[in-house]
Amino acid sequence: MSLIDSLPRVGAPKLPKVDGLIPWIVPLAIVLIWQLACVTGFVPSRVLPAPTDVALAGWKLLLSGELVRNIWVSFWRASIGFVIGGGIGFAFGLANGLSQLSAKLTDTTLQMVRNIPHLALIPLVILWFGIDESAKLFLVALGVFFPIYLNTLHGIRTVDPQLIEMGRIYGMTDGELFRRVIFPGALPSIFVGLRFALGIMWLTLIVAETIAASSGLGYMAMQAREFMLIDVVVLSILIYALLGKLADSASRALERLTLSWHPAFQKK
Amino acid sequence: MQEALRFQPAGAEPVGQADIVVKARHLRRVAEGAARGLSLTIRGLRKAFGDNEVLRGIDLHIPAGQFVAIVGRSGCGKSTLLRLVAGLDAPTAGSIAFGEEPRAQDIRVMFQEPRLLPWARVLSNVEVGLGRERASADAQARAERALVEVGLGDKRGQWPSVLSGGQKQRVALARALVSQPRVLAFDEPLGALDALTRISMQQLLERVWRDQGFTAILVTHDVAEAVALADRVLVIEDGRIAEDVTIDLPRPRRRGSAELAALEGEILKHLLEGSEDTFDL
Ligand SMILES: Nc1ncnc2c1ncn2[C@@H]1O[C@H](COP(=O)(O)OP(=O)(O)O)[C@@H](O)[C@H]1O
Ligand SMILES: [Mg+2]
């Protein structure tokens, strides 16, 4: 700490509200410049529609109910795929982290499968499932599986063995040991997996919906491309970004809630 | 109290208030101590890790309630001995017998690292020490009492990460004490603390030992600490007890007194002589 820092600040701004707004200055400025560039004709609207045009397109789609339906379909696919893939990944992570036998039996196989990029399976998946719902769910689940599996496994394996020994010395049963020592110890790593998985979830869904779907945000964007509705294309991209941000914020909030003991999450 | 002081015979040594309290505590310990602490008899104890024979025949009797310190060069098997006593490892040969069949919560260990659960508040960490009795109705009250005993009553709701090293170690001590153990084994519990914190922790250890009367086995690399706290100092060398020194000085002992320094010097000399034989270290 420097001398300046330790001195009491005279007239230091005490405006927490303003502080919270600072991260929004740059995005707002970008939208403003974008709007200006479009209005002045610097960027032709065939290349990039003005933010107001995008908002207008969104409004129209909202009124027709199309937007809500497509967002809902995409959201549903994302969640179901995530729950299935994440659930299985978590279960394997737990099993292989806690049982040597289970790890010997399945870990090598899983590590081999991991090396196949899951999006490379799209042609095969279309052959198997057509452009049915199950195709998208399968791809999302597969994509989400590995980050959750790997990080759960890593989290459990790296729990401080001294704490586990302590738990045993103080007579914890296996169940208590898991609940009070192993699981809380693995949680930070599980959250890392969760955040990775959320990113992969959206990415997989976008690709799958653009290539093989008859509804959803990706489908909406592809349809709009066919009819040269560039404002709808841009709208779809922005909504994807928004949903991704939302999922990330939700996982961060959950992290803050459950990891309040962690020095990184303690308020000063 | 005042009355009692006045009726002392003229020739008696004047006794201060503090001394009376200490004496009373000591008497209480002697009265309860025999019942509280467990005696310990070790015979022909050996432990080998593969080809590495760490302990080569330890024979030792520790009376109930005694404070024993174990010193020796690093890697001589002090922790190994302690882990065997605490039942964390099985001996290769030999036996360890207690005066009575101990229950699980009668023997507790404290390590150099506090080993607190970072995700549990201080009070819950102390409750862990109750073992099987964790679910009992008075669990929380007992944990609180143990925290007060180590002087951290006001930290019950904190996360361990905000405590200092010394405070964490005090929480670990409260956790070890809460089940009222009859044998308490310490594996260099103060090794990672700074000098001042160490001295106050030593005083705390001595106080709880006097109050509770458990049998204390303290492994330390600090010979001054050993002679200041223990009734008896054991020097381990080549897997055996090389020296067994009784420290027959009244408590509380004054740090830096000539007697303590002399004893410390003697033991240190022995340790250093030992290391000259093995120059390859
Ligand atoms: N679990 C173990 N496996 C193999 N060797 C061990 C194990 N624990 C201790 N040792 C060996 O036993 C010797 C004594 O170790 P220790 O009891 O920890 O010494 P210290 O007196 O420093 O506490 C060392 O040589 C150490 O390498
Ligand atoms: Mg050791």
Image (cartoon, grey):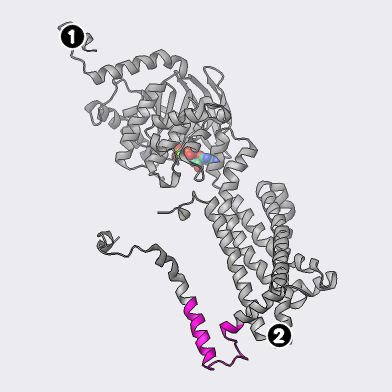
- The answer to whether residue A98 is magenta is no
Q: Quadrant of residue A176?
A: top right
Q: Quadrant of the C terminus of chain A?
A: bottom left
- Residue B21's label in the rendered image is none
Depth check: give the residue in front, A253 or B169: A253
**What chain letter is assigned to the residue under label 1?**
B
- Residue under the point 72% across and 52% down: A104
- The answer to whether residue A30 is magenta is yes
Of labels 1 and 2, the one closer to you: 2
Residue B14, image x and y in percent? 18, 14
Tag 1, which secondary structure? helix
- Residue B6's label in the rendered image is 1
- Residue under the point 73% across and 62% down: A81
Q: Is residue A10 above or below residue B173?
A: below
- Residue under the point 27% across and 25% down: B253
Q: Is residue B266 above or below residue A29?
A: above
Q: Residues within 10 Å of mark 1 (few under 14, many from 20)?
A: few
Q: Are marks 1 and 2 on the same chain?
A: no
* Alpha carbons under labels 1 and 2: distance apart: 105 Å
- Residue under the point 55% across and 55% down: A255
Q: Can residue B112 be seen?
A: yes
Q: Is residue B61 above or below residue A201?
A: above
Residue B244, image x and y in percent? 39, 24
What segment carries the magenta color?
A: A27-53
Q: Amino acid at mark 2?
A: Arg
Q: Can residue B223 be seen?
A: no
- Residue A225's label in the rendered image is 2
